[in-house]
Amino acid sequence: SGTCGSSQFSATEVVRFCAGRVNLRVGEPQLWWPRGYGEANLYDVQVELLQQGNVLTRRRETIGIRTVELIRTDITTREEPGEFLFKVNGVPILCKGSNWVPADVFHSRDASRYERMLKLFYDLKCNIVRCWGGGVYEDHAFFDLCDRYGMLVWQDFSMACAAYPQDKIFLDTMAEEAASVVRKLRNHASLALWCGDNECDIIMDMAGFDPLKNRITREVLPNVVYNHDPWRPYLPSSPYYAPAALAAKDGDVVPEQHLWGPRDYYKSRFYTESTAHFVSEIGYHGCPNLSSIKQFIEPDYLWPWHDNPQWITHCTDAVGVGGAYSYRIQLMADQIAEMFGVQPSSLEEFILASQISQAEAKKYFIEMTRLRKWRRTGIIWWNAIDGWPQFSDAVVDYYFGKKLAFHYIRRVQEPFCLMIGEPQSWHVPVSAGNDSLADVEGEFRVWDADDGQTLLEGAFNVQPNASALLGQIRVSRGEQRLFLIEWTANGQTGGNHYLLGTPPFSLERYMGWLQQLATLQPSFPAETVGK
């Protein structure tokens, strides 16, 4: 029997064997939906095994009724675009979310951080979370929260960035591990996809091995999923190099991609000309808040940033100075210079400049997806929160200190959002994105942050799960201006902004704009940024 609000069902069936199936019919079911598309309805279900009217055993589950499909092609080209699209209950879903890394470097503390960490995902309006293959398998408490929050879970099997053994002992071990994980987690409504690994296809291809001969992801894991969870999609790797993609010898033909590249200016051609339909990794560095840095860097090493062994150790380089990942501190400084044309002379200024460049970058990456709906179908950016104290792409540090990017992302991941695209033919387009199943109507205004002049205003009515062009504003690429956007839709107020122009921007001027940006809805205290 099961109950979800006013919806109820019950059935009694004769069990004739130790294995089999029972078909249940639920009239007018309350469906489970991803965040923004409806309620994450869950049924409390009880199953009892009876013998002559006596209860032999009883089990309770929380079940979501929904379908999940992954519609994809092996390759995509500019001439013949492919696809990588999740559908839930037959409805295309524009996915917006973040990658999940281990909650804590000491895994015995993971569970104690689940709720607070996933609440950040919820506040950021995420409707998907990707459990990265370099992490660990999370427990039921993690998935229970995702079930309730309406967040799809993309679950990698725990392999990442390597070529793994192919001998029988290892294959058998992987099969046993995968079967235990699949059987444990398969009843969760949030679980949307099993993925073979993280970036192993890429690594094998780069090392001269044929990913098609990886028996773990081409034989073992699909067989496990077929035997224990045949109704849930399976993807061999992220990104997946299908035979046609390998034959093309071009990573740009893969529909689902990880966009790391040079990590230069966030509007460089690497980002603007990407062929990806679905971006499952993309990031940009941002310095933690000062109060957090002081908790993991000794006073004598707080400044300067360059040639600083403690900063390098805490940029995820186990070796330290000269290690493979020690470049990340320099990268963070370079990203500041890309945007502002200067290197800050103090720690406080470095933190603020870094957080601004990260916030603008990640906001742009998400808008880059929403403004190209349905050519783009999803983005899972890297990442929401760190599992240890470090300088990283996370928008919340290990101590739960929110960087500026957190507030910008929270605005642009709202199910309904107004956005401004890049200049074309002397104009920028003002568009509305409606990632919900309801009509959205209201009024909006766009104005110049410096003089308050209204640039565009009016009413809108946007169809469900659609985008709409609301108008254009005449501009010149040679200008550097900040446009503020505010709207009221179905009784709710929202806000966003657009930074026009090419770098370098004035850090001092942006700091003045920050006060106005903080007052848009949802607001945030500008004076706390970087602190």
Image: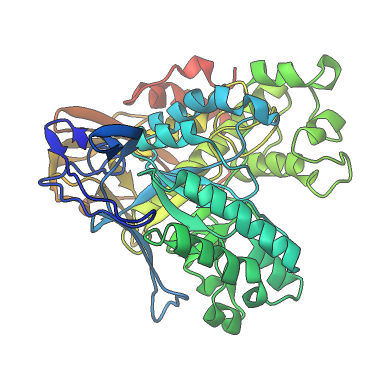
**Rendered position, 41 above or below 520:** below
Q: Residue 237 location, x and y as percent?
A: 57, 63
Q: Residue at x 19, y 33 (%)?
A: 3
**337 sits left or right of 465 in the view:** right
Q: Quadrant of the C terminus?
A: top right
Q: Residue at x 72, y 16 (%)?
A: 295
**167 sits left or right of 259 in the view:** right
The quarter of the picture where residue 334 lies is top right
Q: Residue furthest bottom?
A: 247
**Rendered position, 319 above or below 113:** below
Q: Residue at x 29, y 42 (%)?
A: 64
The quarter of the picture where residue 124 lies is top left
The residue lying toward the viewer, choosing from 151 and 531, is: 151
| Residue 273 visible in the shown view | no
Q: Residue 471 location, x and y as percent?
A: 21, 51
**257 sits left or right of 29 in the view:** right
**345 sits left or right of 513 in the view:** right
The quarter of the picture where residue 241 lies is bottom right
Q: Residue 371 location, x and y as percent?
A: 34, 54
Q: Residue furthest front?
A: 52
Q: Residue 435 location, x and y as percent?
A: 26, 47
The residue lying toward the viewer, choosing from 58 and 305, is: 58
Q: Quadrant of the N terminus?
A: top left
